[in-house]
Amino acid sequence: MNRPRANHPRARVALTVVLLAALTAVLVPAVREEGYFSDPAGLTWWYAAAWTLFAAAVWSLRRVPGRFLVPLLLAGAVAVCAAGLAGPPLTSTDSFRYAWDGRVQAAGISPYDHAPADPALRALRDDWLFPPDSRGSRGAAACDGHPDLVAVEPGVCTRINRPTVHTIYPPVAEGWFGLVHFLSPPGARHKAFQVGGALLALAVTGALLLVQRRRGAQLRDVAYWAWCPAVAVEAVNNAHVDVLAVLLSVAALGVVVRRRALGGALFGLAIAAKLLPAVLLPGALAGVRRWRDAAALLVPAAAVVGLTYLPYVLASRSSVFGYLGGYAQEEGYEDPGAGGRYALLRLVLPDSWAVPAVAVGVLAVVAYVWRRGDPGQPWSGALLVTGTAFLLMTPGYSWYALLLIALVALDGRAEWLGVAVAGLAAYVSVRALGGQTIPVAYGLAGAAVLAGWALRRRAGRRAAARGGEGVVPGPPHGSAGAVSRCGTSPRKPSSPAGC
């Protein structure tokens, strides 16, 4: 009897290819839709369609034969990155600051010494970052009707956000800005950083494939990063430097189990690219009981961070931390009553309790990961710490979740992707739906995480009841089969950390 055509290997591959093509077709207008200010509701629908097709494509990949996996993963990754190149940055102006910092360094000036609005740097201004008006002069009309332009002095506007404050980017990020500027042809403008972001995103896909293949894990999980709409939008189109930190973080997680000092050095580079990867260190320290083992990781990490800052410290007259403290205050992390930070905690606690509650919650999860985490799978504990921090702090910038998406690709617990979707809603949809969007979105994301944990716990108990102690069924997307993904130690079904 012939098998149904829907189950034929070629049919499965064809369905996945069609879904990837549809995803790419939706991503192109999504990154060209100028709706962040004018039509956030319409832009939200484009993103919703992209995430739906992404979920369908990943689900379809479950039934694709193994010999087609790597070609499909790579082809889809290239297509998603190409879609991100279809238009200029439309939902973030951060890459304009990157370009400016690269230009300043090329002139032999420390980027930490002057804000873009500083008159001392007028000679470095051009018509791209400081656009002229219709009369050919840099007049006030250049800002009229353009919410992405900022006035820097009478008659002068710029595309650079926060032009009156010093840069906050760490030294490895600044090195990347200088490198892109050095390699870019004249007139490349924003496209140079977008191409750089695409290359880094593809490098992350390659690094994930190497890590998963080395540990004998399912390669299908790499699709969570390679095909994710957030990669096209935030890593490529908006060219956020977070993707560089993600690449270094994946490399660190991939080697730290066998080579702790090298992993620590790579963690140091990741932290010096974007401070956020510091939340991965508890996962890398899971199961570590001896101080010398912890020092073997932490000392190289701290040394690398210090060494990367040293040249800028010597070359700068101002603080190399720039506007970092002001940024934290501006975003409401110091004043929990401002903005949408700590949105879930503020539903049940007084505003003044939010910051202490975050500290207690994160420390509790860190302690849990240290005590119960699997040292053979540092990404599992890192995902739990990172995702919990996001749920407690409810950040309003969607590109922060790039790190979390890469952790999902390593660990396979797809329910944590809801946190990335919540970040997107907090950044875009809140403009159309109002402030309650943030607690609702993050609340649904937290519910999805708890549901995933409950389903895995239930599946583990059923397996144990059938006499399968130590044999763990794969997660809902079918990535692990019947073999424990925790190396020699079986996954504890009652543990929300997984391993």
Image (spheres, rainbow, N blue to C red):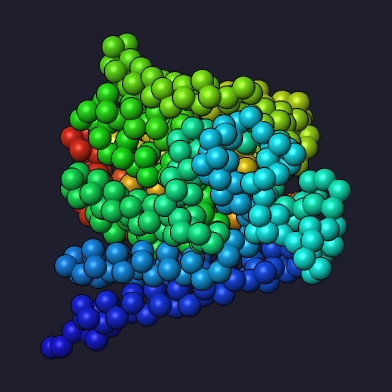
Which percent across, then down, holds residue 223? 35, 60
Q: Residue 282 falls in which quadrant of the image?
A: top left
Which sits in the foreground, 361 or 93?
Answer: 93
Q: How many marks?
A: 0
In the image, taking residue 60 as reference, residue 197 lies left or right, namely right
Q: Residue 112 falls in which quadrant of the image?
A: top right
Residue 303 showing in the rendered view: yes
* On screen, residue 72 above or below 226: below
Residue 363 showing in the rendered view: no
Which sits in the foreground, 195 or 72?
Answer: 195
Which percent across, then down, holds residue 409? 36, 51
Which sits in the foreground, 451 or 306?
Answer: 306
Residue lying at the far front of the rendered structure: 123
Q: Residue at x 37, y 45 (%)?
A: 247
Q: Residue at x 71, y 30 (%)?
A: 326
Quadrant in which the C terminus appears: top left
Residue lying at the far left of the rendered structure: 1
Q: Residue at x 50, y 38 (%)?
A: 174
Which percent across, then down, holds residue 15? 33, 79
In the image, taking residue 208 as reference, residue 196 lies left or right, namely right
Which percent across, then down, holds residue 496? 42, 38
Quadrant in which the N terminus appears: bottom left
* On screen, residue 238 above or below 167: below
Residue lying at the far top of the rendered structure: 291
Q: Residue at x 29, y 59 (%)?
A: 220
In the image, taking residue 258 as reference, residue 319 lies left or right, namely right
In the image, taking residue 196 as reference, residue 48 lies left or right, namely right
